[in-house]
Image: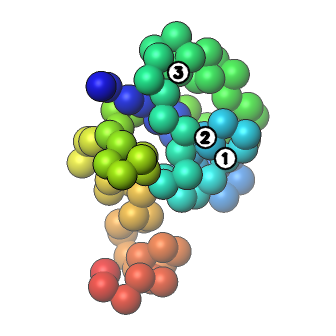
Amino acid sequence: MCFQILTANHLTRGVVIYWTGQDWSENPARALLFDSDAQAQAALGAADYIAVGAYLAPAQSPQGQPRPLHFREVFRSLGPSNYPHGKQHEARHV
């Protein structure tokens, strides 16, 4: 089955965010998995003012947790790549 997640950047903080069905989260594991293109498109159309550049991204659901399929989305979920700060600074393995 092909799933999608709704992702964007936070308007004032610039971090990557994911739609949970109720609010936005920085944690991709909390993203709502859409299995219906119609529902995904409706959510995209209703993205609120805090989300900049919202779009749908293909995802999978191993063990029931959303995970992006495309390398770009995995990379975005790790945080900025230009120098260690934010999520990368907090992670000791990066």
Question: Residue at the spot x=44%, y=23% of the render?
Answer: 35
Q: Quadrant of residue 53?
A: top right
Give the residue type that dot 3 points to: Ala
Horizontal and vertical percent position of residue 13: 66, 58
Can the viewer see residue 33 in this picture?
A: yes
Q: Does 27 sit left or right of 23 as displayed? A: left
From the image, tell me which residue sits under label 3. Answer: 40
Q: Is residue 78 above or below residue 9?
A: below
In the orientation shown, which residue stands out farthest toward the bottom?
92
Viewer-side residue, 90 vs 21: 21
Task: Tell me the quadrant of the picture where the C terminus can be found.
Answer: bottom left
The 10 Å Cα crowd at callout 1, few under 14, some 14 to 19, many 20 or more, is: many
Q: Is residue 7 above or below residue 28?
A: above
Question: Residue at the spot x=34%, y=32% of the render?
Answer: 58
From the image, tell me which residue sits under label 2. Answer: 19
Q: What element does badge 2 sit on? A: strand
Q: CA distance from mark 1 to mark 2?
A: 5 Å
Task: State yes or no: discs 1 and 2 in contact (Cβ < 8 Å).
Answer: yes
Q: Quadrant of residue 56?
A: top left
Q: CA distance from mark 1 to mark 3?
A: 15 Å
Give the residue type that dot 1 points to: Trp
The 10 Å Cα crowd at callout 2, few under 14, some 14 to 19, many 20 or more, is: many
Task: Tell me the quadrant of the picture where the N terminus can be found.
Answer: top left
Q: What element does badge 3 sit on? A: helix
Viewer-side residue, 91 vs 11: 91
The tag on residue 49 is none
Q: Quadrant of residue 92?
A: bottom left
Q: Which is nearer the N-term, disc 1 or disc 2?
A: 2
From the image, tell me which residue sits under label 1. Answer: 24
Q: What element does badge 1 sit on? A: strand
